[in-house]
Image (cartoon, grey):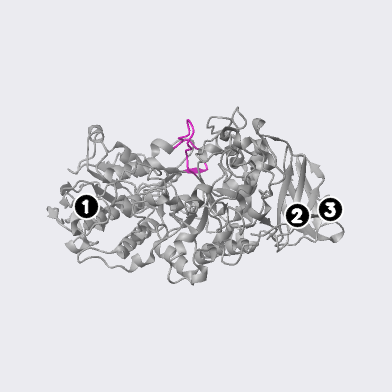
């Protein structure tokens, strides 16, 4: 934390240019080298650019040029590495939404790097200093506290922008150098930059928890062996810590509290925070691309770290409060569709420009391949209601850069009418929480019937088969960063969030989990074995389902958060991946966590090898006139096709037949796509069951590919069963079989169709 002198010095700025917004190092008039600064501040009366030296001394440069509500100026001699901010003058009248306060130093919304050693984005505070608030926080009359202006200087306590040397897009970001994995072929892996690498023993200690750590060969080797095609990074935009967390000795770990939409979060950089983080992030992207792995960013454009009217003044609030945020009819208050105190007013051109400029920057200059939009329904609201013809969605649809990258919506917000699963237009994929709920409910025995499960396993055509959307519009997941880990899902029925300091009130109570009879970790071998089998069932179900699967970092190795289902403030071992799990052997007769990793890798390899598991079009379900074979068929435990009555009846055993003969589309040379056919049998009962394998025309025999029951009991992959065989399914298990066509020369199948038991 630096200090500023009592009377800052001043220096003039040349007129400069209103575009581009932000700080751009360049050659100016007469060949002078310096930086052009441009800031949109629609209702402001004056703007001062503030430059800070290494000792925190401030120099103010009045920006006297105003073009289309953009204040701008060129300052010769300002080089990359220069720290800066703005002071914006105007009316203070919170009752009408006006909250200008020149005593508060403001972060440039277009800053491409942030030196966060000072302020709420840094690590040195146990509470936010009162100086960072635009209002007098301790005003005795609390009902009007936010209306009394605080004139104390905030400069020593807030993060500053950093001028960077822009890197022109080069060959490293050209289309032919990006992985460009088709949506249908994608397997997403959601991870936290810090948490994924912080405890990795093969990564040098000084690189752990950083972008460079994620680029390390040891980290990339794990991703490649796992078989994922894209990493979805929890927020890496510069973010800040909330006051209520700092006061409890905690920090915002997930990062859903953005304050800089162009800047990589400085705390994740091993190389420094005065611009070096930009190059380090780019190098990370290059390393992942070289390994064939795409980079998707989880982005938070729905709200900022400035919270509601009682929150700090860090950037947009002091630049033009009513120009950036949605205000209520009582303009002192904020419209809150996010649950975080404020909502960006995306309908306004300057806000839409900020978001789309940020998105294009991360694609063209930072090399990322797509985005997952947090609370995307808030971005799709016009003035009040969610509108799929909103300006934001319309701009994305026609943008020549953004319409070509991966776009994932979290299709809800917390406002009225905010739940929009299945409603986003073509180009967009969606987190499908209905898939999550159906799969969890099936495996805990809570589905009233199997109608919903059938839709979810086959691509959710009821949600997405409209307007040209495809099965890969559904991003299927069983777990995400928000909620239980996969291991905790089978270990806890109740959340255990006491460490968050909110008396266990935070986090959802709708976990749809089952603890297998004992709450928390257990030494009972029977409970442990059942839990590990349930983990195998959930992973297998996810990776055999039509759509785009999303895994969460650590689920493949049994990561636990001790029952915490809202670990957003747990920046420590609770959230960091424990890599020692991969070295822990299982009990006698029961595989350890590395076997779960091996199964997950085998399933991703199977998915990559078989286009029938990566369909680009929905199933028709129609039978061929010649032999009655369908591209998708559903079977009861008796080996007969399911009827309408079966769909409406309770069932714990479902057979799903996927035909490799009827895959729509052609390969790159125009030839029809053909593949093996598979029968997946999901059995969720706590008792063994008899399942009859379908006969002609479905197969002549069946070969075991994956079995989630214990392989030590004689169910190793490769075993053949004849069509019509009655197979005994162990309690709570998945059996994946490859259909072997019937022999056409009149000889018998490879294995006679006699009843067998492998329980």
* Of residues 739 and 316, the one drawn nearer to the viewer in this rendering: 316
Secondary structure type for disc 1? loop
Q: Which residue is mark 2?
A: 6
Task: Write the start and end of the magenta stretch as one range.
Answer: 409-429
- Answer left or right for 69 relative to 402: right
Count residues near mark 2 (Cα–Cα under 10 Å), then give few for <14, some for 14-19, many for 20+.
few
Q: Is residue 162 above or below residue 355?
A: below
Residue 419 belongs to magenta span: yes
From the viewer's perspective, is 417 left or right of 526? right
Circle 3 Cα neighbour tier, 10 Å, few/some/many (<14 / 14–19 / ≥20): some
Q: Secondary structure at mark 2?
A: loop
Viewer-closest of 741 and 220: 220
Q: Nearer the viewer, residue 71 or 318?
A: 318
Q: Of the two numbered discs 2 and 3 on the same chain, state the one appearing first in sequence.
A: 2
Report x, y in % for residue 540: 31, 53
Q: Is residue 425 visible?
A: no
Compared across the picture, whether 681 is left or right of 108 comes to left
Q: Quadrant of the N terminus?
A: bottom right
- The residues tagged by marks 2 and 3 sit, at their Cα atoms, a distance apart of 20 Å
Q: Can you name the residue that lies furthest to the top here?
A: 329
Counting from the top left corner in percent of width and height, residue 368 is at 56, 55
Disc 1 versus disc 2: nearer the observer: 2
Q: Which of the two discs, 1 and 2, labels the residue nearer the N terminus?
A: 2
Residue 312, x across and y down, in percent: 60, 45
> Residue at the location (29% across, 46% down)?
493
Q: Which secondary structure dominates the residues rendered in magenta?
A: loop
Instruction: Report which residue position mark 3 lands on.
Output: 12
Q: Confirm or deny contact between disc 2 and disc 3 (CB under 8 A).
A: no
């Amino acid at each position: 934390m630096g200090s500023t002198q009592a009377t800052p010095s001043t220096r003039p700025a040349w007129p400069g240019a209103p575009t581009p917004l932000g700080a751009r190092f360049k050659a100016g008039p007469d060949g002078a080298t310096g930086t052009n600064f441009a800031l949109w501040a629609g209702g402001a009366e004056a703007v001062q650019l503030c430059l800070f030296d290494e000792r925190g001394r401030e120099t103010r440069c009045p920006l006297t040029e105003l073009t289309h509500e953009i204040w701008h100026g060129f300052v010769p001699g300002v080089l990359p590495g220069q720290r800066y901010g703005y002071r914006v003058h105007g009316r203070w009248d919170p009752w009408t939404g006006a909250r200008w306060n020149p005593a508060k130093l403001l972060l440039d919304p277009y800053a491409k790097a942030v030196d966060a050693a000072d302020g709420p984005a840094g690590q040195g505070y146990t509470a936010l200093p009162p100086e960072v608030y635009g209002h007098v926080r301790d005003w005795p009359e609390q009902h009007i506290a936010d209306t009394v202006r605080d004139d104390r200087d905030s400069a020593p306590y807030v993060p500053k922008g950093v001028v960077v040397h822009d890197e022109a897009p080069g060959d490293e970001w050209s289309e032919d150098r990006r992985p460009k994995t088709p949506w249908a072929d994608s397997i997403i892996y959601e991870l936290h930059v810090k948490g994924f690498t912080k405890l990795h023993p093969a990564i040098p200690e000084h690189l752990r928890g950083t972008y460079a750590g994620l680029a390390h060969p040891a980290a990339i080797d794990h991703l490649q062996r796992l078989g994922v095609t894209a990493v979805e990074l929890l927020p890496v935009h510069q973010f800040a810590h909330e006051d209520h967390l700092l006061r409890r000795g905690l920090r915002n770990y997930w990062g859903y509290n953005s304050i800089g939409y162009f800047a990589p979060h400085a705390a994740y950089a091993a190389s420094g925070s005065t611009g070096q983080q930009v190059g380090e992030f780019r190098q990370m992207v290059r390393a992942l691309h070289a390994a064939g792995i795409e980079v998707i960013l989880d982005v938070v454009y729905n709200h900022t770290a400035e919270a509601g009217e009682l929150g700090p003044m860090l950037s947009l609030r002091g630049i033009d409060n009513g120009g950036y945020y949605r205000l209520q009819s009582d303009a002192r208050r904020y419209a809150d569709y996010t649950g975080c105190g404020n909502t960006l007013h995306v309908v306004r051109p300057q806000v839409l420009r900020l978001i789309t400029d940020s998105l294009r920057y991360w694609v063209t200059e930072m090399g990322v391949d797509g985005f997952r939009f947090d609370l995307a329904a808030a971005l799709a609201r016009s003035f009040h209601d969610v509108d799929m013809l909103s300006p934001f969605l319309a701009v994305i649809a026609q943008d020549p850069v953004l319409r070509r990258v991966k776009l994932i919506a979290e299709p809800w917000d917390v406002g009225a009418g905010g739940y929009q699963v299945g409603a986003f237009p073509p180009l967009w994929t969606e987190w499908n929480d209905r898939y999550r709920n159906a799969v969890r409910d099936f495996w805990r025995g809570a589905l009233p019937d199997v109608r919903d499960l059938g839709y979810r396993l086959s691509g959710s055509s009821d949600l997405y088969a409209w307007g040209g959307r495809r099965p890969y519009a559904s991003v299927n997941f069983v777990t995400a960063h928000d909620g239980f880990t996969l291991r905790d899902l089978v270990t806890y029925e109740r959340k255990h969030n006491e460490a968050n300091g909110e008396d266990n009130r935070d986090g959802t109570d709708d976990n749809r989990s089952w603890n297998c009879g004992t709450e928390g970790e257990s030494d009972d071998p029977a409970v442990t074995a059942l839990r590990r089998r349930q983990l195998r069932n959930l992973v297998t179900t996810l990776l055999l389902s039509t759509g785009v699967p999303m895994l969460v970092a650590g689920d493949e190795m049994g990561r636990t958060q001790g029952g915490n289902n809202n670990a957003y403030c747990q920046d420590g071992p609770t959230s960091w991946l424990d890599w020692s799990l991969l070295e822990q052997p299982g009990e006698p007769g029961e595989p350890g966590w590395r076997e779960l990793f091996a199964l997950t890798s085998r399933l991703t390899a199977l998915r990559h090898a078989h286009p029938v598991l990566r369909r680009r079009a929905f199933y028709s379900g129609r039978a061929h006139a010649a032999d009655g074979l369908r591209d998708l068929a559903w079977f009861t435990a008796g080996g007969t096709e399911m009827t309408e009555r079966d769909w409406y009846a309770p069932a714990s055993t479902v057979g799903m037949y996927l035909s490799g003969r009827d895959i729509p589309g052609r390969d790159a040379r125009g030839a029809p796509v053909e593949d093996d056919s598979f029968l997946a049998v999901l059995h969720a009962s706590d008792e063994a069951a008899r399942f009859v394998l379908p006969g002609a025309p479905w197969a002549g025999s069946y070969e075991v590919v994956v079995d989630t029951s214990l392989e030590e009991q004689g169910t190793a992959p490769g075993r053949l069963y004849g069509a019509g065989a009655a197979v005994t399914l162990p309690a709570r298990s998945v059996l994946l079989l490859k259909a072997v066509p019937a022999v056409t020369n009149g000889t018998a199948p490879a294995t006679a169709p006699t009843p067998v038991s492998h329980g």
